[in-house]
Amino acid sequence: MAATEASAKPATASEIREIVGPIEDEILTGILALGATREEVLEAETWLSSDDYLHRQLHHGLSGRAAEVFAILETTLPEPDQP
């Protein structure tokens, strides 16, 4: 199997949990439904865990399923403190 074929394979539930850590089943189901690859999930998680607030807010560079995974994972973040 070519590397591009393997990388286009949707991530499994265990791969997703390995990347993002413990998540609720409905979050996992949403990501699985997208058919995102391991690389797309990893890209989204990298953006989500970035310390660069502006980087995350601008959403530059994320597109397609990685952006959709990011949007799902972003809902798991705690609400910021309101001034």
Image (cartoon, helix red, strand yellow):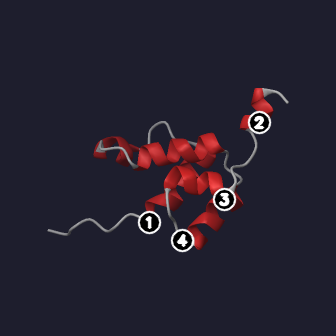
Answer with left or right where residue 65 lies relative to residue 58.
right
Q: Which residue is mark 1?
A: 76
Three-letter code for the amino acid on which mark 3 is drawn: Ala
Image position, residue 37 (x, y; %): 67, 45
Residue at left offset 62%, top offset 48% = 65
Three-letter code for the amino acid on which mark 1 is drawn: Thr
Three-letter code for the amino acid on which mark 2 is drawn: Ala
Secondary structure state at the residue bearing disc 1: loop
- Disc 1: CA contacts within 10 A as few (<14), some (14-19) or many (>=20): few
**Tag 2 or tag 4, which sits nearer the N-term?**
2
Instruction: Judge by depth and name the residue closer to the eye, 70 or 28.
Output: 28
Give the foreground label among 2 and 1.
2
Q: Which residue is mark 4?
A: 24
Q: CA distance from mark 4 to mark 3?
A: 11 Å
Q: Which residue is mark 3?
A: 13
Q: CA distance from mark 2 to mark 1?
A: 29 Å
**Tag 3 or tag 1, which sits nearer the N-term?**
3
Q: Which mark is residue 6?
A: 2
Give the foreground label among 1 and 4.
4
Q: Which residue in the rendered view is the most extreme toward the left?
A: 83
| Circles 1, 4 touching at the beta carbon (< 8 Å) | yes
Three-letter code for the amino acid on which mark 4 is drawn: Glu
The quarter of the rendered structure image containing the N terminus is: top right
| Circles 4, 2 touching at the beta carbon (< 8 Å) | no
Q: Which residue in the rendered view is the most extreme toward the top?
A: 2
